[in-house]
């Protein structure tokens, strides 16, 4: 049972093509379908489209790492993203960065992105493969947000800085599907090095969130081990 639905603009088709050659913010590639909702947070503990952990508080940094999992597309509706962010759990703004996997072409297409909700996301054109290791960090200074994402396997980093009159009421490490439709994710997703203001996740009073999968139950986060946890299909 959940209290409110999670919604956030995730509109790939609204983005400009500029920057594709340099890996700067760009439109989603061919095979990456536009979807209109992805989710800002709520007080939901189960049944929403965020799965992972959120900690309420006036956080200034959120960071986490993960290895992009190998997936098998089960339908062209499958779409999900692991990400790190500030805000969204009980607020209407989210400042976030992560990697989306889209199955609308029949095969997984990976795309790194950042978003300053309620504005639509911007995508990066850097190459991504399953098995790549990522570290993502969101840093707030006043109303300025710096969003960094690094593929440590391929050796690239993208950084975006933007101001927003946000509520900065939470921080989180999340997987999410706007369609409640996930591919088969080999081993789930393990987040490591999850720290808010430098504190290990386990010491920040985190709240567990379950994510819907319309095909088979939910994704449920396992126990927090200091600064890490694994979220997988239950």
Image (spheres, rainbow, N blue to C red):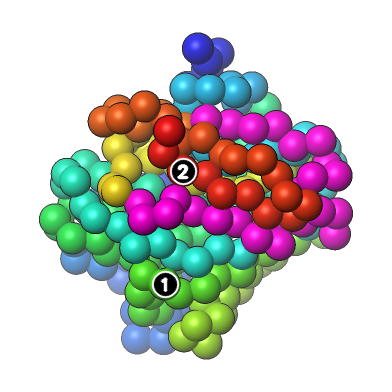
Classify mark 1: helix, strand or loop. Answer: loop
Kindly identify which residue carries mark 1. Answer: 131
Q: Examine the rendered structure and indicate whether residue 55 appears above or below residue 115.
A: above
Pick the residue in front: 221 or 51.
221
Kindly identify which residue carries mark 2. Answer: 232
Where residue 178 appears, as percent x and y from the top left, is 37, 37
- How far apart are the two marked residues, 2 and 1, measured between alpha carbons? 17 Å
Q: Is residue 186 magenta?
A: yes
Where residue 100 appears, as percent x and y from the top left, is 39, 57
Specify whether residue 61 is in view.
Answer: yes
Region in magenta: 185-210
Specify whether 127 is left or right of 210. Answer: left
The residue shown at (66%, 40%) is 223
Pick the residue in front: 175 or 185.
185
The residue shown at (40%, 78%) is 126
Pick the residue in front: 88 or 118.
88
Pick the residue in front: 127 or 130.
130
Specify whether residue 165 is in view.
Answer: no
Disc on the earlier residue, 2 or 1 = 1
The residue shown at (85%, 44%) is 203
The residue shown at (28%, 47%) is 183
Specify whether 174 is left or right of 140. Answer: left
- Location of the C terminus by quadrant is top left
């Amino acid at each position: 049972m959940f209290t409110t639905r999670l919604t956030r603009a995730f509109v790939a088709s609204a983005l400009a093509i500029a920057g594709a050659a340099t890996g700067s913010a760009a439109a989603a590639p061919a095979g990456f379908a536009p979807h209109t909702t992805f989710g800002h947070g709520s007080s939901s503990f189960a049944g929403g489209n965020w799965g992972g952990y959120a900690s309420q508080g006036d956080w200034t940094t959120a960071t986490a790492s993960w290895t992009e999992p190998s997936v098998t597309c089960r339908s062209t509706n499958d779409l999900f993203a692991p990400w790190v962010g500030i805000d969204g759990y009980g607020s209407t703004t989210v400042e976030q960065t992560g990697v989306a996997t889209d199955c609308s072409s029949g095969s997984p297409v990976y795309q790194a992105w950042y978003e300053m909700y309620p504005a639509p996301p911007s995508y990066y054109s850097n190459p991504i493969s399953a098995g790549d290791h990522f570290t993502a960090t969101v840093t707030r200074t006043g109303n300025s947000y710096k969003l960094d994402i690094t593929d440590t396997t391929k050796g690239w980093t993208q950084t975006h800085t933007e101001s927003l009159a946000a509520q900065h009421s939470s921080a989180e490490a999340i997987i999410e599907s706007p369609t409640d439709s996930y591919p088969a994710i080999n081993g789930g997703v393990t987040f490591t090095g999850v720290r808010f203001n430098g504190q290990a996740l386990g010491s920040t009073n985190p709240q567990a969130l379950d994510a819907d999968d319309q095909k088979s139950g939910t994704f449920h986060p396992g126990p927090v081990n200091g600064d890490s946890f694994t979220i997988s299909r239950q």
